[in-house]
Image (cartoon, rainbow, N blue to C red):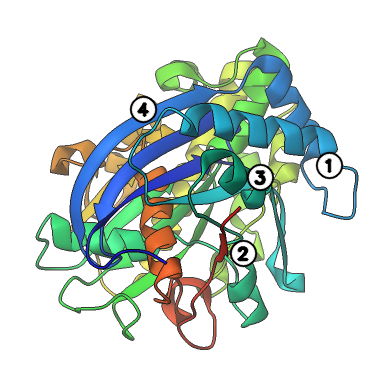
Amino acid sequence: MLKDGVVTALGTMSGTSLDGVDAAVLQTDGERIAGFGPTAYRPYSKAERAVLQAHLGRWPEDDISAAKEVVEAAHLAVMAPFEGIDVAGFHGQTLAHDPGRGRTHQCGDGGRLARSLGYPVVGDFRSADMRGGGQGAPLAPFYHFALAHWIRADAPIAFLNLGGVGNITWVDPRFSRPEEEGALLAFDTGPANAPINDVMQRLAGVPYDDGGKLAAEGRVDASVLSAFQRDPYFTTSPPKSLDRNAFGRLSGAVSGMALADAVATLTQAAVWAVVQALALCPTRPNMLYVTGGGRKNRTMMDWLARDCSCDVAAVESAGMDGDMLEAQAFAYLAVRAARGLPISAPGTTGITRPAVGGYVFTG
């Protein structure tokens, strides 16, 4: 289907923070990164965000038509202006994720996008992994492996994505392929921005704690934090993954606090979860590169630097684009999927063996 060698792929991502759709172009052969192209962002309106929020937790058998229309229309709007695209990766919007029951639901029809855009679109990235006994998440680690080679890392490093949920990828770049045993370990750390954003939206009418300013003014509630730390998720061996609302009781526990104290407590919970995740890595990474919206939260970054046992920096410090890294990842995975290369492995999702995933929609 694809021409040989390096192709131009467009990747999209609409994450659990429900802020909007990222789109990014990547030149790749599905193994190495050859170059980066233009990017775009299409924010969700307040009304669109409310629609998506109302559909969280719903499955395909439910009535999701309103959410589906929001997701597909937003993706078409951001993808249509790009030119010269050979293939696109469409993740869709995760509405529900239940790895314990082998179920996941990403809303949106890749076939509609392929018909409208006129080129192949790869979607449904997670189902095959879950059928093989995997968690279906996280999927960006294979791209993190390619990035580790692109920045010429020569010792283990880690990538921390602070989206709605946090996830970490430990990478040993001394391996030549991501599916090799020992090359990668990846898992969700715990809640990140989702509970903070939800509390901010509910109590302040704004979608996030801008720069972590409110958290810096608040006091962490030790009793709420202690109860959070006792959750058995944190002593479960990886790989492991979470639904966006897996720690919904944490948001409930801070509901009676002053807003600044609630946000400070939620921020510290996210940081503590990352510290626990680092302790589960095979070795301490030389550097923790942070991507996702959380890297713009100065308080969260300061507390990570204070509490983590390694150096912490935003991915921009190594020449990467933290706003578009997840979208780039699905451009990369689209090429791998179209060429029959694995996109997950036992060390990233817990699947029994490396697996090819994704479905190619051709219109």
- Residue located beneath label 1 in the image: 64
Residue 163: x %, y % from top left: 49, 41
Q: On the rendered structure, is 26 left or right of 232?
A: left
- Residue located beneath label 3 in the image: 112
Q: Residue at x 61, y 32 (%)?
A: 18
Query: Tag 4's secondary structure?
Result: helix
Q: Residues within 10 Å of mark 4 (few under 14, many from 20)?
A: some
- Residue located beneath label 2 in the image: 233
Q: Residues within 10 Å of mark 3 (few under 14, many from 20)?
A: some
Could you tell which of marks 4 and 2 lies nearer the N-terminus? 2
Up the image or down, 26 lies above or below 5; here it is above
The N terminus: image quadrant: bottom left
- Give the foreground label among 4 and 2: 4
Query: Tag 3's secondary structure?
Result: helix
Query: Tag 1's secondary structure?
Result: loop
Real-space Cα separation, disc 1 to disc 2, in angstroms: 30 Å
The front one of 355 and 263 is: 355
